[in-house]
Image (cartoon, rainbow, N blue to C red):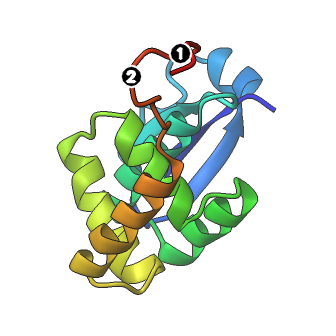
Amino acid sequence: MSGYYYLHENGSLIYKPSIAVESDPDYFKSPFVKKYWKLEETDRGNAWVIILEALALGANIDRVKELLAKWSMSFEDSIKMITRITPTDDMKKGLNIFIKEILGMETDEFWIRGQVVYEKDKPKKPPHGRPGVEA
């Protein structure tokens, strides 16, 4: 299902189907809309942008938790995201909120545990450095 999420000034993170939004170019022109994002269903990085920027801009924590569960986004997934995208300032701010308010961790603990996940999941290179060639 393709669509958009927008952050209402009251902290609600609300979904709207693409057909409703794209048929009206002024759909999000409202003083109540803080920001909106198009959801790219096949791009997990895009989902993280929505989550983290929304948190930075004051999204309701319980609503963000609902979306994290719906999209199967976890601590491990956040580590993978960090290694694949370049964060905006809002994403950095949102990540700090995610760490403290959603994961219930201190920042140092997140980075220490994240390093373990990263080391476990990163691709292993053969000792000679050329993939596909036996040593």
The quadrant in which residue 13 appears is bottom right
Q: Is residue 72 above or below residue 30?
A: below
Front-most of residues 53 and 60: 53
Answer left or right for 10 relative to 71.
left
Give amino acid for label 2.
Answer: His
Front-most of residues 9 and 122: 122
Q: In the rendered structure, find residue 25 and report the number of the disc placed on it.
A: 1
Q: Residue furthest right?
A: 1
Q: Is residue 71 above or below residue 133?
A: below
Q: Residue furthest left?
A: 89
Q: Is residue 8 visible?
A: no
Q: Residues within 10 Å of mark 2 (few under 14, many from 20)?
A: few
The quadrant in which residue 96 appears is bottom left
Answer left or right for 52 relative to 50.
left
Percent x, y of residue 56: 30, 59
Percent x, y of residue 76: 53, 61
Percent x, y of residue 102: 47, 78
Which residue in the structure is indicated by mark 2? 128
Closest to the camera, between mark 1 and mark 2, is: 2
Q: Secondary structure at mark 2?
A: loop
Q: Secondary structure at mark 1?
A: loop
Q: Is residue 69 above or below residue 133?
A: below
Q: Residues within 10 Å of mark 1 (few under 14, many from 20)?
A: few
Name the residue rendered at 50%, 36% in the picture: 123
Answer left or right for 101 relative to 45.
left
Total labels: the figure holds 2
Give amino acid for label 1.
Answer: Pro
Name the residue rendered at 71%, 25% in the picture: 18
Name the residue rendered at 38%, 21% in the picture: 129
Front-most of residues 125 and 6: 125
Q: Is residue 92 above or below residue 39?
A: below
The quadrant of the rendering that contains the N terminus is: top right
